[in-house]
Image: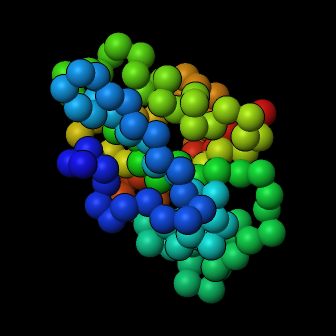
Amino acid sequence: PEYLPNPRPKRGQELSIMLDGEGSTGIVWATLSPAEANGLLQEHNFLDEDEEDFFTGRKNLIFVMDLRVDEEHRGQGQGTQLLLEAIEDVPEVWLIAFNEHRSPVPFYLKHGFEVIQRNRHDQALMRRRV
């Protein structure tokens, strides 16, 4: 279906999709793979080339790769619902907040995340521990 992200999720990834009667209104896509999370940190300049094992050996964490709610459905609690379902019972959650249109940092701060680091593009590496 057209609401699935491209490329498609693979083993070790989880995808939740919020639907209404006409199609997708939002998605959250996460990985449980420390190696994949390390790759994302390197790709977005949060790690030096020699730092490749930031998440290796850590257990019980999830890295949110994408959280998106369609423009016309924002402000209705769908992003909160998607996020909370994805991170339920996970003691450590990481993500990168991208500043494409407006900063999502306040949304994540409201949900218990903290800014750990910013890269040269003012993207924020964030963590939530419970």
Side (left or right) of 64 relative to 34 = left
Looking at the rendered structure, the number of numbered marks drawn on it comes to 0
Image quadrant occupied by the C terminus: top right
- Which residue lies at the image location 57% right of the left edge and 46% below the top edge? 126
State whether residue 83 appears in this view: yes
Among all residues in the image, which is located at the extreme top? 76
Residue 116 image position (x, y, % from top left): 62, 49
**For residue 15, above or below residue 49:** above
Colour setting: rainbow
Residue 66 image position (x, y, % from top left): 42, 48
Side (left or right) of 103 relative to 22 = right
Residue 118 image position (x, y, % from top left): 50, 54
Among all residues in the image, which is located at the extreme bottom? 50
**For residue 14, above or below residue 74:** below
Q: Which image quadrant is residue 129 in?
A: top right
State whether residue 69 appears in this view: no
Residue 69 image position (x, y, % from top left): 31, 32
- Which residue lies at the image location 19% right of the left edge and 26% below the top edge? 22
- Which residue lies at the image location 48% right of the left edge and 65% below the top edge? 10
**For residue 35, above or below residue 109:** below
**For residue 23, above or below residue 122:** above
- Which residue lies at the image location 54% right of the left edge and 57% below the top edge? 13
